[in-house]
Image (cartoon, rainbow, N blue to C red):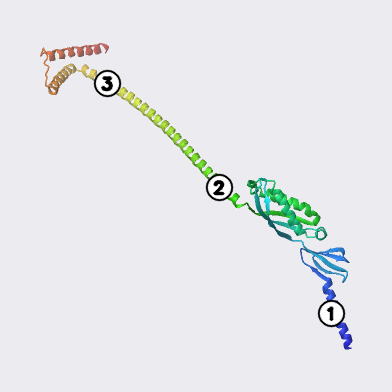
């Protein structure tokens, strides 16, 4: 009885071991490549699978996730014979587990080596100054070259990115000097452009100021001329009105006598003023000049009055 129990226990252990060896659980986004008697049999997707003991075995395990691989730095020579150190990173993904297992020994090593050779080829076609500007173009060339070869490997190359481009120290110093000179050049150009614009602005301001001053002077002279014309006009109107008033006053009774008296007073007043302003006194040869002048003016006034009477 005890021997039979031992045998049962041994058989149970063997069954359990065989079950553990043949049962496979494939994780999500993964595939297992199964060989039967050394030949490809099938590809297991995600889930639980049972294999035949001693006949089936899992030969390869592939992840269908996107993989990131660092590409080691390498020395590349540009078209103008400058050595630069370049490294990068490549993104790829297995799309066919069978091809990735049997199409190439190690698709990761193959992708890395091909990316390096493609990068050297792309760098060799451009000058050093263009390597920093043409990074996108270089990345695209590497992706196209590696992806074309990786189709036979069951691998899809998604993208490639250059991480660092390191020129020699001597070239870096020369590039820094060139950039400094370029910055100084741009600064000098900016200063000269600013000075030029400032001069233009000042000249334009002076021109507009001169125009404004001339316009102001023109308006001033026009206003002064109009003022003088208006002044002359008003003075003429006032003089005419004064003459008309005098004429009307002479036409009245006693007007001529009043005029004679006024003329005599003014004559004597002005004669006295001459004596005040100078030490030399001029005495008329005929003292009766006052009466004769008054008589003359009286005759004129009477003539004016008679003409006015004739018109009426």
Disc number at residue 182?
Answer: none
| Residue 189 vs residue 112, the one in the foreground | 112
Q: Quadrant of residue 155?
A: bottom right
Q: Quadrant of residue 304?
A: top left
Measured in 3D between alpha carbons, the distance from the residue under mark 1 to the one under mark 2, in whole angstroms, is 78 Å
On screen, residue 103 versus residue 140, left or right, reads: right
Determine the residue positioned at 84% across, 68% down.
57
Disc on the earlier residue, 3 or 2: 2
* Callout in the foreground (1, 2): 2
Q: Mark 1 sits on what residue?
A: 13
Q: Quadrant of the image for the N terminus?
A: bottom right
Secondary structure of the residue carrying tag 3 is helix
Secondary structure of the residue carrying tag 2 is helix
Measured in 3D between alpha carbons, the distance from the residue under mark 1 to the one under mark 3, in whole angstroms, is 150 Å
On screen, residue 6 versus residue 117, left or right, reads: right
Measured in 3D between alpha carbons, the distance from the residue under mark 3 to the one under mark 2, in whole angstroms, is 91 Å
Residue 288 place in picture, x, y as percent: 11, 13
| Image: 104 above or below 227 | below
Disc number at residue 239?
Answer: 3
Q: Mark 2 sits on what residue?
A: 177
Residue 68 place in picture, x, y as percent: 71, 59
Secondary structure of the residue carrying tag 1 is helix
| Residue 295 vs residue 181, the one in the foreground | 181
């Amino acid at each position: 009885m005890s021997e039979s129990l031992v045998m049962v226990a041994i058989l149970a252990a063997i069954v359990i071991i065989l079950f553990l060896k043949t049962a496979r659980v494939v994780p999500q986004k993964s595939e297992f490549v199964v060989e039967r008697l050394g030949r490809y049999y099938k590809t297991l997707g995600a889930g639980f699978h049972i294999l035949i003991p001693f006949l089936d075995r899992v030969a390869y395990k592939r992840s269908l996730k996107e993989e990131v691989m660092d590409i080691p730095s390498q020395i590349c020579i540009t078209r103008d014979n400058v050595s630069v150190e370049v490294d990068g990173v490549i993104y790829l993904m297995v799309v066919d587990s069978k091809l990735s297992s049997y199409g190439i020994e190690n698709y990761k090593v193959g992708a890395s080596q091909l990316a390096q050779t493609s990068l050297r080829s792309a760098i060799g076609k451009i000058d050093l100054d263009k390597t920093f500007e043409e990074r996108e173009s270089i990345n695209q060339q590497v992706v196209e070259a590696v992806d074309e070869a990786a189709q036979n490997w069951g691998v899809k190359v998604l993208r490639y990115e250059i991480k660092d481009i390191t020129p020699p120290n001597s070239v870096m110093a020369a590039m820094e000097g060139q950039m400094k000179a370029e910055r100084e050049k741009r600064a000098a150009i900016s200063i000269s452009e600013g000075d030029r614009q400032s001069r233009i602005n000042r000249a334009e301001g002076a021109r507009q100021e001169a125009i404004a001053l001339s316009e102001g002077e023109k308006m001033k002279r026009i206003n002064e001329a109009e003022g003088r014309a208006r002044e002359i006009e008003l003075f003429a109107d006032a003089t005419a009105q004064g003459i008309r008033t005098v004429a009307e006053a002479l036409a009245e009774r006693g007007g001529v006598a009043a005029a004679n008296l006024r003329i005599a007073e003014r004559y004597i007043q002005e004669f006295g003023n001459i004596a005040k302003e100078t030490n030399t006194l001029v005495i008329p040869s005929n003292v009766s000049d006052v009466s004769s002048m008054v008589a003359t003016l009286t005759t004129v006034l009477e003539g004016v009055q008679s003409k006015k009477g004739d018109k009426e």
